[in-house]
Amino acid sequence: LLKLILILILMKLKSLIVVLLCIVVCSSCEQPPIEAYAVLPQPQEINYIQGFVKLKDKPMVVYANELSNEALLLASYLKNDFAVEVTLEEGKDKGDVILLLDSTVLPDKKGGYVLEAAGSRITIKASTPEGVFNGVQTLRQIIKEREGRLTVQKALVTDYPAFSWRAFMLDEGRYFKGKEVVLNLLDRMAELKMNVFHWHLTDDQGWRIEIKKYPKLTEVGAFRDSSEINHFHSNVFDGKPHGGFYTQDDIKEVVDYAAKRHIMIVPEIEMPGHASAAIASYPWLGTTGKQIKVPCNFGVHYNAYNVADPRVIQFQGDVLEEVIALFPSPVIHIGGDEAPRTRWAVCPKCQALVKKEGLKADKKHTSEDRLQSYCMKRVEQFLNERGRQIIGWDEILEGDVAPNATVMSWRGMQGGIEAAKLKHDVIMTPNDYVYFDYYQSADKEQEPMAMGSCITVEKVYNFEPVADELADEEKKHILGAQANVWTEYIGTPEHVEYMMVPRMAALAEVQWMMPEKKSYQGFLNRLGSLAEFYKRDNVNYAKHILPEVVPAQTK
Ligand code: ACM
């Protein structure tokens, strides 16, 4: 019996020892807590896995044949962001970072990708190079230094955009910025997975694109004597000549740079208004035929193309021929906004055309409104015959809208809603939510002079491009959202950055995320990590805005 008791005690002791050992072993391999990603825009789905992928000092990036552009960009990002040199290997399937094309990955979600950080490697796969590129942008934002090593919290990310049109517009007509500014902007856009750059290249105060057939457009139209300061109609001028333009070689370089970053450039050639710089170059383009100077003052000007003159029709076609040879985008923006009708009302040729074409006024529209739509329809037909579609500002709805036109809704949402009901595709860029030339803080005294009202980061974040009142079929016509930086008051690259950042980051979440998943607080929590990128790159972001919106621990 004594023996039996002894055996039982020993057995108990053994299991006690086993339990104790388990406790010791488990506590020594206790997993670190999950560190949530701070990615902007926030991916659709992240499933975290315990632990970190630790990158080697010189990681090997392997990639499918068609992904050499994405692999090279990843290598340049890692070098720039983290001073890491990588080895690039095409066509291999084993490495530390693997870029893959796989037609079964989110095939109906354009731009979608899957990123897997598991085991000792990171795999990004998508059905298109664009998707892989978006995954690369996510990867840049989730690499963190931990205990002297570059690491990535393990996770499976499945991601795709809410909207196909994720755009940003820069006005170069008012102030010419130059290639460096545009290339930097394209990089900032790519970082936020934006995919359309709307380049506003012509306006009253400057023509910025070389057109070989009409050299005076840039010899004359790209330069003005002075610029109005203080406010529109202040009649106070800085007395400094201003000007500049892009040669066709510059344009090709910028288009190529954008294409590598999966950004389509949509050029805007304004017509029939905002045409003073062109008319200053070739006075016969206007209704009076008189020589004018490139205007130095801002605000809407009275000059418009003489749309009834066959030479003007020829000119518009010639310019667009050169434009479409430079820009592969399936859509070309032809303006259409703020074209004053006053000069047409007193232009005999225009009135003769109104009569000939039977362009009759009705309760809603004047015969000059109809003349504008007549002109836009003709330009649309010209571009359609060459395989391109048009986009115009929402004024193109006044009169008869050109049949295949995409409408860019800027005077609020109403134009876009109306256009979607008429089955036109729509880009939402309402001036009360996404005009980044407006003040970004209510404390206007502390801000550089800007346009009238105030659009805070939070207001941008809360922008919802799809109006509830639209039926499901109509909602499909809302292609996406865009912010605009008009530059009447914005003369320098630093000032452009100041107006863009951080509002641009809020816009990116509007463009990418499903509305029901958006959270302003979540955005603020993640914004701090992007601010680190801005600091690193010396971006002149609105620093007094970030402390207001970013909680202290993430700054
Ligand atoms: C615009 O802001 N005039 C389109």
Image: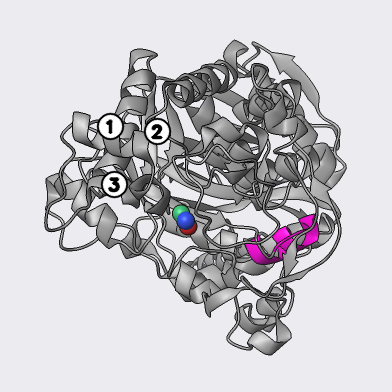
345, above or below 423, in the image: below
Locate residue 298, reporting x and y percent: 62, 61
Foreground residue among 365 and 349: 349
Q: Position of residue 103 (x, y in %)?
A: 39, 19
Residue drawn where x is 53% and y is 24% of the image: 129
Which residue is nearer to you in this view: 53 or 255? 255
Q: Amino acid at mark 2?
A: Val
Q: Is residue 112 visible?
A: no
The amino acid beneath tag 1 is: Leu
Name the image quarter holding residue 250.
top right
The location of residue 401, given as percent across then percent down, is: 23, 40
Q: Is residue 197 left or right of residue 81?
A: left
Label 1 CA crowd tier, 10 Å (few <14, some 14–19, many 20+): some
Bounds of the magenta span?
A: 490-500
Q: Secondary structure at mark 3?
A: helix
Q: Image quadrant for the N terminus?
A: bottom left
Which label sits on residue 368? 3
Compared with 222, 508 (above or below) is: below
The residue closer to the viewer here, 212 or 484, is 212
Q: Which residue is mark 1?
A: 353
Numbered mark located on residue 534 in the image: none
Which circle's residue, 1 or 3, is located before the other in the chain? 1
Mark 1 lies on a secondary structure that is helix
Which quadrant does the C terminus fall into? bottom right
Q: Is residue 63 left or right of residue 19?
A: right
3D distance between C-alphas at marks 1 and 3: 10 Å
Name the residue that disc number 2 marks. 307
